[in-house]
Image (cartoon, helix red, strand yellow):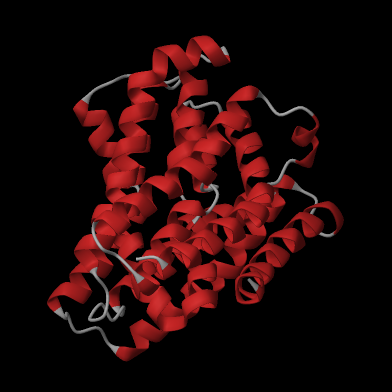
Amino acid sequence: MANVLSALMPVFLVIALGAVLKRVLLQEDTHWVALERLSYYVLFPALLVVNIARADLGGVAVLEVCVALLGAIALMSAGLWLARPALCRALRLDGPGFTSVFQGAVRWNTYVGLAVAGGLAGPAGLAVAAVGLAVMIPALNTLSVITLARHGHNAAPGLRRIGLQVVRNPFIWSCAAGAAINAFHLPVPPVIVTFGDILGRASLALGLLVVGAGLRLGDLRRPRAATWVASVLKLAVLPALAVAIGVWWRLAGVDLLIVAVAAAVPSAPNGYVLARQMGGDAPLLAEMLTVQTLAAAVTMPLVIAAIEIIQKHI
């Protein structure tokens, strides 16, 4: 547990620093919007390309990791879509509100995931996390775009509109570029690799600071029922699904640990950007992100401790 806390605490300290900076030094929202856009369109895509491109996947059970993560996402997504009418009635949600529950329950905070994976398992953990990046980011962004296109304020269902939103997403083509470089051993000049690595390192710290700055602590006074439902689904049910599928497929060691970490992190702040762009309920999603980020400081150590127990019995 001491190792778990030592890996998690720096991550949450950077998030806390972002919250402090927002209230003390960089109080204007425009500052953080600019940093968010810089991270979204430049720094984070560089992080994705570099980490996926140079990941050593020789010791990773790639197929099993992909099945565990994508299987959990598929089950959660299908369950939410099927339960949408009942959820909307029970939680008094409109279409945009449902899109926030969907994003809050299935997306993952890559910044936290990478930081914790590296802190817990070093290069081996980052290699497994790179597999998660390559498969989860395109899948989650595509599912989120489809859900928002169908149920957001600006809903105008159609394959062309959905396709355009997917193609324009910088995370998807970044994952595709990194995967192509890794799979086909495409030559990349060292200066370009170093350039991308510098940008990627900046992305991790800046991304965590932006997460902290986006926390709305005032929302904690009376979170809505939808926030609690999405948070339980994301922080407890999704990791349980991923771990169960992973154990079924005989995952163990670092592979199973990082699958659990990837599933147990809070939802992604980038979902808030997507909600604003496509007519989702952005304020509701911001409330979910705040609750999940703070709750994850408690739930993630519990999930990781549970993995250690499971590992002893398989």
- In percent of width and height, residue 80 lies at 39, 27
**Of residues 262 and 157, the one drawn nearer to the viewer in this rendering:** 262
Q: Is residue 222 left or right of residue 8?
A: right
Residue depicted at x 24% and y 70%: 61
Residue closest to the far top = 89
Q: Is residue 17 left or right of residue 302?
A: right
Residue closest to the far right = 24
Q: Is residue 278 left or right of residue 14?
A: left
**Of residues 174 and 287, the one drawn nearer to the viewer in this rendering:** 287
* Residue 1, placed above or below residue 281: below
Give residue 256's quadrant in the image. bottom left
Give residue 127's quadrant in the image. bottom left
Residue 252 visible at all:
yes
**Of residues 199 and 102, the one drawn nearer to the viewer in this rendering:** 102
Residue depicted at x 67% and y 54%: 298
Q: Quadrant of the N terminus?
A: bottom right
- In percent of width and height, residue 204 lies at 54, 68
Numbered disc total: 0
